[in-house]
Amino acid sequence: MEQLIIFGILSLPIIIISRRTLFNIKSHGFYRFFGWEGVLWILITNYRFWFVAPFSLEQMIAWIFLFVGGFYVIAGVLEMKTKGKASKIRDDKNLFRFEKTSELIDTGIFKYIRHPLYSSLIFLTWGIFFKNPTVLLFVISMISSILFVITAIMDEKECIAYFGDQYRDYMKRSKRFIPFII
């Protein structure tokens, strides 16, 4: 019961942040919301195990995933802050202000992967999962990961609609989540 109460309380900010896209199945934000909710449930379930048996194989794998995810999000946010040019020209109410870039970012980490922030969420999901892996959390982690993949695919459709061939060319020379791999 405690987990459900915490989940409900912590879901409120996610609902508020996602309110513009929550009922728009064609928006990447719709799928992102449910992915975030999955990560939240895994976190609430596993927070008690964060530092248990710190040198076990599961914990070591968890920390690797968490550090990679942390690197991706920091590198992505820094690149967006320095190279991203938010524009009022891009008047899409479903996008956050920092997502309304008028110029394609293809430098830094974005030179290698198109979605460092979604990739970081996938790594975060699995990092938290490995803190105390269970069958139920494996299923939730898989579902969350799939939702983040769908989020990225929907985001790419939105970027193609805005940037056109420039984004298609960018897709040919970059990977979606992991440099040189996928």
Image (cartoon, rainbow, N blue to C red):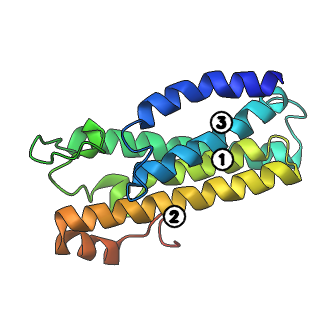
> How many neighbours does mark 3 have within 10 angstroms: few (below 14), some (14-19), or many (20 or more)?
some
Q: Position of residue 41 (x, y in %)?
A: 71, 37
| 37 to the left or right of 1 | left
Mark nearer the viewer, 1 or 3: 3
Residue pictured at 24% horizontal, 55% vertical = 105
How far apart marks 1 and 2 lie (CA) works out to 15 Å
The reply to whether residue 95 is visible in this rendering is yes
Q: Mark 3 points at which residue?
A: 40
Which comes sooner in the sequence, label 1 or label 2?
Answer: 1
Q: Mark 2 points at which residue?
A: 178
Which comes sooner in the sequence, label 3 or label 2?
Answer: 3
Note whether 28 is above or below 18 in the view shown.
Answer: below
The quadrant the N terminus occupies is: top right
Question: Which amino acid type corresponds to the residue marked 2 in the rendered image?
Answer: Ile
Question: Which amino acid type corresponds to the residue marked 1 in the rendered image?
Answer: Thr
Q: Where is residue 125 in the image (x, y as percent from the top left)?
A: 66, 47
| 135 to the left or right of 166 | right
| 110 to the left or right of 67 | left
Q: Mark 1 points at which residue?
A: 125
> How many neighbours does mark 2 have within 10 angstroms: few (below 14), some (14-19), or many (20 or more)?
some
How far apart marks 3 and 2 lie (CA) works out to 23 Å
Note whether 11 is above or below 162 in the view shown.
Answer: above
